[in-house]
Image: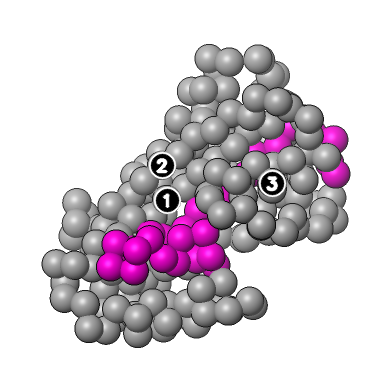
Amino acid sequence: MTFSNTQKIVLASGNQGKIKEIQAIFKQHPIVPQSQFNVVEAEETGSTFVENAIIKARNAALHCNLPAISDDSGIVVDALDGAPGVISARYAGVGASDHDNLVKLIDDLKDVPTELRTARFVCVMVFMKHAKDPLPIIAQGVWEGVILTESVGENGFGYDPIFWVPTQQKASAELLPEIKNSISHRAQALSQLTDLIQKR
């Protein structure tokens, strides 16, 4: 499968933080957010990151008549049996803000000692040539860390302020964007996706 470098690819997300990161990392092709086409976001009814990513990519490809990339990501906490997981964006309820979700996660872990606060950011990315693509390309990235007891740093979005990155000795929200975009779960998934697209 080949593309010209001018081939537009629609990004099946309305999350401005994700859009900014993906556009910064995936520079091979012009990435156009689905909001430019007034696409209604797909309902994420899957029970896994893979299922939700496919649902979103198919919806964007169908309504935009373009190849589509989707991202489904979240934070998986060992002490909570994998929660928040696929409901990371709405952990504190439908319409919850990033702050609401952070507060809930910190509260849910208030009695958990540091050594048991291990967690990871997970990102699954899907590429579909068109809405009926029977063989979507699927890539994933995992970024290991520890959940902090309070927010630190001003960068990033989502759970970044409470995600401690041992290899950097900083919270994700303290990292410069160029550093985060070279090591994060999303960076890993995009790098893998790019390689798989080129091989396909």
Residue behind mark 1: 122
Image point (42%, 82%), residue name: 104
First of labels 1, 2 by sequence position: 1
Residue numbers of the magenta segment: 63-89
- Residue 55's label in the rendered image is 3
Residue 8 falls in which quadrant of the image?
top right
Q: Between marks 1 and 2, how big is the CA–CA gap?
A: 6 Å
Task: Name the kind of residue labelled 1 in the image.
Answer: Val
Whether residue 1 can be seen here: yes
Task: Name the kind of residue labelled 2 in the image.
Answer: Gly
Kind of element beneath mark 2: strand
Q: Nearer the viewer, mark 2 or mark 3?
A: 3
Name the foreground residue: 15 vs 113.
113
Task: Name the kind of residue labelled 3 in the image.
Answer: Ile
Is residue 67 found left or right of 46 in the rendered image? right
Does the residue at mark 1 contact the one at mark 3 (Cβ under 8 Å)?
no
Does the residue at mark 1 contact the one at mark 2 (Cβ under 8 Å)?
yes
Residue behind mark 2: 141
Q: Is residue 88 above or below residue 150?
A: above
Whether residue 164 can be seen here: no
| Neighbour tally class for label 1: few under 14, some 14-19, many 20 plus, Cα within 10 Å | many
Q: Nearer the viewer, mark 1 or mark 3?
A: 3
Image point (26%, 73%), residue name: 148
Name the foreground residue: 95 vs 187.
95
Q: Between marks 2 and 3, how big is the CA–CA gap?
A: 19 Å
